[in-house]
Amino acid sequence: MTAEKSQGQKNTPRRRVTWFLLGGGVLIIAAIASGLGIGLRHDQNSAASVSPSASPSSSPSSSSPSATSSATASASASATPSSSPRSGVNITSAFALPDWKLDTSSAYRISKSWNSSEPPTTREFNLTISEVVGWPDGYNRTLTVINGQFPGPLIEVNMGDRLIVNVQNNGANMTTIHFHGMYQNKTNFMDGTYMISQCGIPPGGSFTYNFTVPDQYGTYWYHSHYRTQYMDGVIGPFVIHSQEEDDLIGDMYDYDQVVLVSDWYHGIAVGYMSEYLAPNNENAEPVPDNGLINGAAYFDCSLTPDDTCYQQDANRTVFAFERDKTYRLRVINTGAFAEINFSVDEHPLTLVEGDGTLIQPTTLHKLKVAVAQRYSVLVTANVTTTDTFWVRAELDEYCFAAENPILTDYSINGVLVYTNDTDVAAYSNNMSAETQSWGDVAANVQCLDLNNTSIEPMIVTPAAEATVFYRIDSSFQIWDYAIDLAYMNGTTWSPASSSILYQAYNMLAPSLSSTVEDNNSTQLLNTTGPLALGVFGGNQDQYIVNVPDYEVVDILINNLDDGAHPFHLHGYKFWVIGSGYGTFPYNDYGKFNTTNPMRRDTVTVVAYGWVLIRFVADNAGVWPLHCHITWHLEAGLLMQFQVQPKKIAAFEPPAAWAQLCEA
Ligand SMILES: [Cu+2]
């Protein structure tokens, strides 16, 4: 199914034209390069004069090639390999990276000399969105990228800092940028959700995100929140440092490294939607064609009849580790659908962080990471039998509704090599390992989270007593003659014609007393209580539950579907109070262990199961609760909480924010 779709997409005019131009270039270069005994694309890159160790310049963007910070020297250090050397290891690329490829071996290495205790400062980054042709696994396709490169640049700040992120949209579609997991207290309008917290940034337009991170730290990520766009490449890691975190776990590791894992599709994401939502499709999501580790992976080009796949470009990511040192790997699932089991052959993982919550160290062999979740694990390079190991991102095929004939190996592999002084390529198409996957863990037998009850936050925080309880039933409804959609309490989301927050703000801000009677959206102010249906302006596409005052909110999500759903709540971390299969045990409500439950921002509700989460509604704004599987979100699996609307009236959004909706 997916292979056919890829072929179908190949025939769209843009792809054909793009490929014709690229193919012609490759042929000419091939003629020049023949006899040199080196790969086609390598030579193409040499011709483009791309230095492997420097930050490559990005062709489509006039701004800086990677995230740039004007704040401090340490802020820009992460983008400059030479300023954060890994002692004893000299990493060079055996071949030049293509322009569009971010060299994650340097760009995703976090300096241990980062100063987390310096006074709060302002850090400014430029993100330019554009489209390029790239080949993360050797298969050429159009990517939507940041600063001309994929994956997106690492953004690092300290807790307490102010972030200024200038987004310039040079792409063909709308965009918005969401910083996943940020509380955005008093800055709900900077949350970056298309037609919820803001209107889209149009092609050719720009918008500046400006917010602070006063009270959270750890591993996060940022991504486009416009429709399916992040699947095409608009993603990047976001790390918040803090003195508290350094004090608690900083001594446990020597090096710090971001590891993005994801599924991967060979076609542009939106191209799959019509077939996915077609009548009678039984919620059969498009099955990925591959997966990626830090934006690269192997793919067997002989599996596809398409002539847009180059075997020598199917490169695996290589991690060079210094023997006997301990590495913090910040594993982030930036994918769209597949749950991923992350592991390193013969190396136990010590879990220390999840979704920005520090965890009492616990050892495991395979780490289950649902879409949008993050975990930090410590890995010590102390195996003596060999020096080369597979790093695995195993796609959990249990979650797939079908097979994809070109996805022949669910284990997406990178290579971990112990080295002290050898030149090691950041990416390799011929480096491999002999090691075996951990055999004691049946990785792919269920789509569910790492057991939240086995995770104990390091900083004990008992859950508050709940004051309100909402039951949310999530389901898919399959029709013979209408498109299949996803429902939350009988409503299915699609983007409103204007930003919900913009509408709420305009309604509330001028005069609170005059708005209640005069408009068709009084539900925003008036709906209260469990199961209140706040249908915005009579529009069934917008299911908004109003939480008028400070409350401690319990949300029971019942999953009536045969698929698992990683639900994400914006603006908060919640306690995971309980979860299970079947129907919720109402008789046990009030008996759950609330002494120190896991706190996170994304949790999976299993097929035909339930999850009970609790959050303190102290953060005013309109906050979506949605499944992070892009297919399901686009099918409508999203609802919104409007918290403390009277405080929304006191927001001070910039004029540019309103202008996006008034264009
Ligand atoms: Cu879902």
Image (cartoon, rainbow, N blue to C red):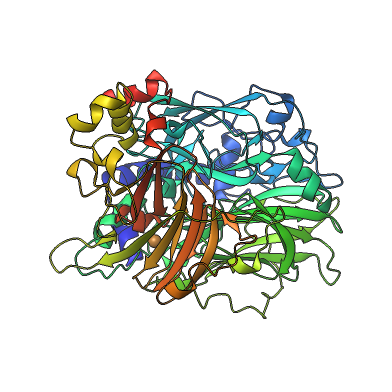
Q: Quadrant of residue 383?
A: bottom right
Give above or below for 147 relative to 448: above
Residue 406 shows up from this direction: yes
- 470, above or below 56, in the image: below
Q: Position of residue 3 (x, y in %)?
A: 35, 64
Q: Nearer the viewer, residue 635 or 438?
A: 635
**Figure quadrant of the C terminus:** top left
Residue 486 is situated, as x and y percent measured from the top left of the image, at 29, 60
The residue depicted at 20 percent of the width and 40 percent of the height is: 537
Of residues 263 and 116, the one nearer the viewer is: 116
Q: Quadrant of ligand 1?
A: bottom left
Q: Taking the image as drawn, is residue 367 in sight?
A: no
Closest to the observer: 525 or 96? Answer: 525
Residue 439 location, quadrant: bottom right
Q: Nearer the viewer, residue 438 or 657?
A: 657
Image coordinates of residue 233 in percent, x first then y, are 46, 45
For the N terminus, the quadrant is bottom left
Q: Is residue 87 left or right of residue 625?
A: right
User: In percent of the image, x 80 and y 65: which residue is there?
Assistant: 387
Q: At 27% from the left edge and 28% from the top edge, which residue is drawn?
A: 507
Name of the residue lying farthest toward the top: 655
Is 552 positioned to the left or the right of 363 in the image? left
Marks counted in the figure total 0
- Identify whether 352 is placed above or below 651: below
Q: Position of residue 212 (x, y in %)?
A: 57, 30
